[in-house]
Image: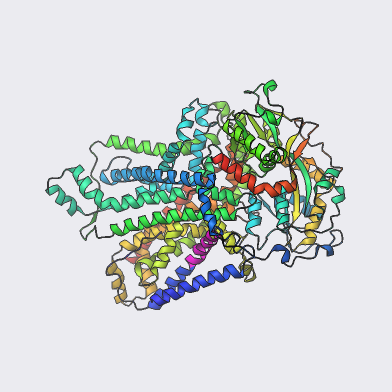
């Protein structure tokens, strides 16, 4: 998703408008093919079942009214709204609170908050949710210790809201932290000179200035939770709580397959998400009204007066958001029996041994990593180019790029995957030599489509902050469009490019929704192998697979980040 | 520039509309499938390229043996029954499969009703089928039954339910009974549909509503259902037989009742795509599958997937686990009834659970 960016004074001399337009239209085409067409196909199934699949499909817009008639759909809609709305409030508040703490004072262990947020962001939501389910299911770890109350507490609508908040708050945390890193002291100094105390300054100056970031962070949590497939997939074995994404998944995996249902449910999901995105854009636009001036500076938080208190709080956050779910998974992966408790006789390394011995998990991991690397490279390049179009060109149809990027963030992976089958299995493409359906290439493209909005958003944020004068100076010195990108934007936006790459790579390794639908025959992927084993009731083995997946994701993310920092440092050196 | 934007948007829309209309698929039967009457598996030569098999049971055990026996290469999609049907539906206008093998003959009858299966071909090994299976199979060979097994028998947790208190027939089920979800697990629909066929729609709906009200729990697949039975989350479950034996062999506190009137059965069946570019290789596959030698091999080497009642005469069944009773009467839903009522029953069930 990309916020519309208007940077005054950015539109300088454009020696090669043709190059900008070519790039702009190329990005529009990429987004239409990767996101627009698949989404359109799915949505059309809701009003014209069979369109593009069989001859003689009939226009039946009345199908959309079915949401009021079918209890399953109604319950799914209500559950989704409760979950996403609740997580938006609670996760938004948690993220904002922690961001205020992190940027407000310094204390030992403060950086753990950043690390936790990033780990949560890149960890597969299915693995995290599965950890909670293993802890709290009626036959889970907690009941093995005789703590049955955990089940009632966690497996309830309120409990699920809390789980989703603990899992998804990093979106709000990062959005608010980013806004807080830069601070215009003159506002605060003026307030302080007028006699306002620290709380009054926070309440009357900082929070109002921060409001757009808080709101956009909360909306991001809402969007992510609403489209999330990981929790409902993990939850399905323990607690009946149908949501819209799970109902869509079920409708395309049953016999007879109900693409019309998937279309109707996707329609409502997308409508809600677009409404949320409009709210987000409105918030971002309001925030762009020059709250910061030229005197803004990066703030260094003063030491906390009672650092121990905040260190304990940080430890509690890390414990509750990471240690509990991942620890539960680790415990199950090392146990003979899920509810067998913490005894020597229940301890086993057999599941890990089986994971390495049976081979399918390793083949799945290799396939998933290869697909994720290809998708991450492609996504980062395309994301960078989209961000360039949005922030650094005078391309008039920027709004199309912006809109496509925004809408596609709101499309759940499962919807996109169904659309991909519709589009890429058309006979006309096969006859044109583009028979990509059933080949791993399609997994890469689907990975690009689902990750591109995130990548664009991360990079646009960085590019929009760059002083426009740099580009103008380069242009005046005769640097062409490509040269300006290469010599000015790439080196300066290096860290954002690396962040985008790391995020996309990590998310791609465990792309459950997409690979479930699109994995070609004989091409097992990590999430599909893990989910299949959960379905077979081999919880220990499946959880060992999930733990190994999480470890793999984190190692890849750490390696990519480290390598990225090196490259960036080298690029800076060269530019100097 | 604004007009350029508009023009570009119009072009994109026009392309979309053109794509949608131009590639609106043709009905399968109208396409250029080879004339099945021209090919006879024994005399034809298998076409080039791997035979693409979508299958739920037996996986590589089956495909590797087939290639070893016939020299025909294969490419398998080893997926859940629901996933296979989803793929087949999504590929409706450009099928990517030649042969399908899954549990649930009603689902294959549905595909046959949509003209998606090859009919009218001569099956050389249909004569190997048991009399019961031959009667079950459609005359045009749209699909052929391979084996049958209990998709639901009464399994109970022996720690919680003494043997004398265990329900002995389906009508005795009550309270927190566990079922697999018919909307998600392929073998669960034959379980639920039999009650609708046997009792009539209204009576079956009333019976299930009562069960749901008295605490019935539904799990997405048989694996999690079996785990829930072991841990006592549900004391009694309508569980697929392979899962029960697996649990009993692992020493879990589980035992079974095979009701006198029969366990709820599912038929494993195979079919050929109406659009297959490899009709000869496909027919060779089905003829190979329905031989006593192949069935004996698959039952012995197929692990859990081999725990079935073969519908091919002369199959050696000595590999069946000792936990399986000698007499295994099965209640099988009629394929026509299963196909005609599938959407309604599944929708009703899902809505009733959500209610």
Q: Can residue B71 be seen from the camera position used here?
A: no
In the displayed structure, would residue A329 be above or below residue A444? Answer: above
Q: Which residues are magenta?
A: A30-44
Q: Main secondary structure of the magenta part?
A: helix
- Give left or right: position of B323 versus A144: right
In the displayed structure, would residue B329 be above or below residue A204? Answer: above
Tell me which residue sits at (76%, 37%) in the image. Answer: B330
- Give left or right: position of B27 versus A562: right
- Give left or right: position of A218 versus B43: left
Please count the marks in the image. Answer: 0
Tell me which residue sits at (21%, 61%) in the image. Answer: A294
**Residue at the front extreme of this rendering:** B202
Residue A276 in the image: x percent, y percent? 39, 54
Residue A489 in the image: x percent, y percent? 36, 66
For the N terminus of chain B, give its image quadrant: bottom left
- Give left or right: position of A466 versus B273: left
């Amino acid at each position: 998703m990309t916020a519309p960016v208007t940077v005054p004074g950015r539109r300088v001399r454009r020696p090669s408008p043709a190059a900008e337009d070519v790039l702009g239209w190329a990005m529009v085409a990429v987004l239409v093919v990767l996101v627009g067409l698949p989404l359109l196909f799915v949505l059309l199934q809701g009003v014209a079942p069979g369109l593009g699949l069989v001859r003689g499909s009939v226009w039946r817009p009345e199908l959309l009214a079915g949401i009021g008639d079918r209890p399953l759909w109604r319950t799914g809609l209500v559950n989704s709204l409760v979950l996403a709305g609740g997580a938006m409030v609670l996760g938004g508040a948690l993220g904002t609170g922690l961001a205020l703490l992190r940027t407000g004072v310094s204390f030992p262990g403060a950086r753990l908050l950043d690390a936790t947020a990033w780990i949560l962001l890149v960890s597969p939501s299915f693995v995290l949710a599965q950890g909670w389910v293993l802890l709290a299911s009626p036959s889970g770890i907690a009941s093995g210790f005789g703590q049955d109350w955990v089940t009632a507490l966690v497996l309830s609508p309120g409990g699920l809201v809390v789980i989703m908040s603990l899992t998804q708050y990093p979106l709000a945390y990062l959005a608010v932290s980013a806004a807080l890193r830069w601070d215009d002291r003159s506002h605060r100094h003026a307030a302080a000179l007028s006699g306002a105390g620290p709380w009054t300054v926070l309440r009357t100056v900082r929070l109002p200035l921060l409001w757009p970031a808080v709101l956009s962070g909360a909306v991001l949590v809402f969007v992510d939770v609403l489209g999330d497939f990981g929790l409902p997939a993990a939850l399905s074995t323990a607690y009946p709580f149908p949501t819209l994404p799970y109902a869509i998944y079920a409708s395309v995996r049953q016999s007879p397959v109900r693409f019309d249902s998937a279309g109707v449910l996707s329609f409502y999901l997308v409508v809600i998400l677009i409404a949320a995105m409009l709210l987000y854009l409105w918030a971002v636009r309001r925030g762009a009204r020059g709250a910061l001036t030229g005197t803004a500076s990066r703030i260094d938080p003063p030491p906390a007066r009672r650092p121990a208190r905040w260190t304990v709080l940080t430890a509690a956050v890390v414990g509750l958001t990471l240690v509990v779910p991942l620890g539960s998974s680790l415990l199950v992966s090392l146990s003979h029996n899920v509810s067998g408790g913490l005894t020597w006789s229940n301890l086993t390394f057999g599941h890990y041994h089986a994971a390495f011995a049976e081979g399918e998990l390793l083949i799945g991991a290799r396939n998933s990593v290869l697909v994720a690397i290809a998708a991450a490279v492609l996504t980062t390049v395309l994301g960078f180019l989209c961000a360039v179009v949005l922030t650094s060109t005078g391309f008039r149809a920027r709004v199309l790029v912006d809109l496509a990027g925004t809408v596609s963030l709101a499309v759940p992976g499962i919807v996109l995957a169904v659309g991909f089958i519709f589009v890429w299995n058309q006979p006309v493409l096969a006859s044109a030599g583009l028979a990509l359906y059933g080949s791993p290439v399609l997994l890469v493209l689907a990975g690009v489509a689902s990750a591109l909005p995130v990548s664009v958003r991360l990079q646009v944020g960085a590019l929009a902050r760059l002083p426009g004068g740099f580009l103008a100076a380069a242009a005046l010195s005769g640097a062409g469009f490509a040269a300006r990108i290469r010599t000015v934007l790439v080196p300066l936006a290096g860290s954002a490019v690396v962040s985008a790459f790391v995020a996309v790579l990590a998310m791609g390794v465990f792309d459950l929704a997409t690979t479930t639908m699109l994995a070609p025959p004989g091409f097992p992927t990590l999430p599909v192998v893990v989910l299949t084993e959960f379905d077979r009731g081999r919880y220990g083995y499946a959880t060992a697979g999930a733990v190994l997946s999480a470890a793999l994701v984190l190692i890849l993310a750490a390696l990519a980040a480290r390598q990225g920092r090196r490259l960036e440092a080298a690029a800076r050196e060269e530019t100097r | 520039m604004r007009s350029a934007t508009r023009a570009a948007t119009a072009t994109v829309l026009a392309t979309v509309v053109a794509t949608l209309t131009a590639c609106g698929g043709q009905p399968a039967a109208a396409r250029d499938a080879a004339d099945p009457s021209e090919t006879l598996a024994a005399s034809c030569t298998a076409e080039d390229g791997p035979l693409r098999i979508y299958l739920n049971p037996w996986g590589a055990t089956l495909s590797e043996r087939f290639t070893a026996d016939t020299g025909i290469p294969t490419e398998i999609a080893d997926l859940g029954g629901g996933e296979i049907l989803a793929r087949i539906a999504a590929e409706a206008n450009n099928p990517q499969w030649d042969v399908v093998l899954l549990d649930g003959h009603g689902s294959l009858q549905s595909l046959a009703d949509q003209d998606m299966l090859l009919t009218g071909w001569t099956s050389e090994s249909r004569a190997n089928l048991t009399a019961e299976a031959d009667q079950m199979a459609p005359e045009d060979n749209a699909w052929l039954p391979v084996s049958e097994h209990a998709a639901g028998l009464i399994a109970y947790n022996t720690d919680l339910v003494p043997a004398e208190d265990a329900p002995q027939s389906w009508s005795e089920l009550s309270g927190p009974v566990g079922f697999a979800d018919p909307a998600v697990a392929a073998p669960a629909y034959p379980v639920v549909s039999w009650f609708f066929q046997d009792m009539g729609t209204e009576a079956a709906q009333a019976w299930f509503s009562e069960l749901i009200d008295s605490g019935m729990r539904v799990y997405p697949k048989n694996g999690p259902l079996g785990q829930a039975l072991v841990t006592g989350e549900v004391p009694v479950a309508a569980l697929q037989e392979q899962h029960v034996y697996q649990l009993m062999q692992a020493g879990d506190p589980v035992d079974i009742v095979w009701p006198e009137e029969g366990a709820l059965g599912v038929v494993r069946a195979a079919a050929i795509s109406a659009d297959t570019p490899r009709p000869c290789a496909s027919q060779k596959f089905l003829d190979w599958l329905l031989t006593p030698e192949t069935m004996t091999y698959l039952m012995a080497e197929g692990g859990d997937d081999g725990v079935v009642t073969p519908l091919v005469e002369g199959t050696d069944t000595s590999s069946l686990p000792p936990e399986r009773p000698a007499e295994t009467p099965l209640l099988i839903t009629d394929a026509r009834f299963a196909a005609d009522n599938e959407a309604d029953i599944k929708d009703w069930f899902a809505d009733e659970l959500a209610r």
